[in-house]
Amino acid sequence: MKEKRINEAEFQNPFVFKTDWKNAFEDEEFVKVFSSDILENYIINKRWYGGKASTLKYIEVVDSFKITSKHNNYYGVLLEVNFKEAFFQHYFMPIAFMLEEELDTNTIIAPVELGGKEGFLVDALHQEDFRKLLFDKIIHSNENTISKVNFHKGVKLPDIEYVSSKFMGVEQSNTSIIYNENLVLKIFRRIYISMNPDYEISRFLTERMNFKSSPEYKGSISVNFSEGDITLGLMQELVPNQGDAWKYMLEEVDRIFSNLSAKKIKIDKLPNIELFQKLRLNEVPPEIIDWAGLSVILRIQTLARRTAEMHIALGSDIHETAFTPTTYNGDYTVWLKNRLTYQFQNRLNILENNLHKLDGLALDLANQFLDNKKSIRKLFLDFDWTKMKSERIRIHGDYHLGQVLVNGDDFYILDFEGEPESTIRDRKVKQPPLKDVAGMFRSFHYAIYATIFNNKDKYPYEQKELFQAGEVLFKYFVGVFLQTYVEVAQAGNLNIGYNKEIDFLLKYCLLEKAVYELGYELNSRPRWSVIPLTGIASIMEFDKN
């Protein structure tokens, strides 16, 4: 495989430059050709490139730094990708130049000749020498050394030797490297001229709060930029796990739906409850325990406990301004309403343009949504901060089952980067912790409906009956989670308000999440838009009107 890729690259004419590799990024001609002819072809095919839906205008190298090992010179390159739609994104790429005999990767950026030497530009992360270099720089970092690139060693990282490194899974929006089988370094590909929330929250939870239910912060890499520090990498402990909670929940829900026929359960006889009705374990009807099983109910309680503990940790610091709880005010309300009315209008436009792709229940619910758009918009505009007695804190911001790892009977929470569609500034706005809870509830809803969609021939019921059973199950999951979450949060002095305020904020945040999801589903898989549309109908209680 490797030989084939290298030979293909050789057949292309190499890009020829007078400069040598050591001075490449100080050479105007090299930078110009690298930005346009080389990078434009390479970057658009990468998993981590987030501009696929837009038209690339040009790429500019805005900064670079040299980092040297005993054997090689490497460059860290900061790119600004400009789009014809009049916006831009920043990316980080570490680059290596390898002679053919040194090459040990298939991931070639381009064949080049530099100062008379023929070789290949490659992504430096594919070179073990470079991965070891990053590890050693973090382990031996000195906080007193002032330089353009800063390596930071966390207080929980012991002095250890490099043993091995490998990539973790498939490359996604970031690239993760496993070191010594017990550490993971996440290299941020899309970067922001600001501290990355994942770094900021991870370090805070570990070093200030000693929070045990997220991977320990071990170190980081950042670069000083004229407009602020940019986080390039985050090192954490590698948590032993059995996969994420999304995978776990899909398996559980499949088992629960299989029980319908195995236990001859009559769906219309299942005891129903109101959404947000809080339930202790002994308040869950025996018919529901018999159907769903005790294990999943206990796990949901544990997840609720860990979620509340995360929020208590994020909201209990009175010294670090970025994490001090705050009250609601007019400025927050203006920010919130502007954001949500813009998003709501955007989703309305997408729905009207895609209505022809829908049929059956999805089409009925879409028309119901359009008929009730004024009442939905009114709910978004009805946010009255003067009635809010609870506090806002830094939150996870993109909380769902996929951001949680299963470890035996327990859970670890990870990935504090925030909502991908939001600006970096918006991700750092303090929000109601119940927004994370609403995110998890939407994830429960998705797990239930994804199970129905993915196994439609497996269960001997009409889809309508399965949806009915799914809604009952969803309300019990919510009720059990909510009871434990509120209990633990209030015992930990987290001010989430009282019952009326909790219900209002949950309804508000659930609606926001479901409307957000609607745009994604209509654009990528219209058949699934029935999931957020069902959620919206349930939250707005359309069926009771």
Image (cartoon, rainbow, N blue to C red):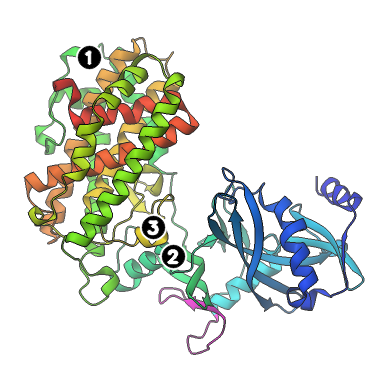
Crowding near the residue tagged with mark 2, few <14, some 14–19, many ≥20 C-alpha atoms within 10 Å: many
In 3D space, how far apart are the residues under numbered discs 3 and 2 (Cα atoms)?
9 Å
The part of the image, by quadrant, that contains residue 319 is: bottom left
Q: Which residues are magenta?
A: 140-158
Report if residue 262 is visible in the image.
Answer: no
Mark 3 or mark 2, earlier in chain: 2
What whole-number distance in Å separates the C-alpha atoms at marks 3 and 1? 39 Å
Is tag 3's residue or tag 1's residue first in the polypeptide sequence?
1
Pinpoint residue 274: horizontal percent, then vertical percent. 12, 29
Q: Is residue 156 magenta?
A: yes
Q: Which amino acid lies under the numbered mark 3 shown in the image of this protein?
A: Phe
Examine the rendering and report whether any part of residue 307 can be seen.
yes
Residue 134 position in % (x across, y down): 60, 72
Q: Which residue is mark 2?
A: 196
What residue do we see at 31% from left, 36% from top?
514
Q: Which structural element holds mark 2?
A: loop
User: Which three-letter amino acid code belongs to the residue tagged 2?
Assistant: Asn
Q: Foreground mark, 3 or 2? A: 2
**Residue that numbered label 3 is attached to:** 416
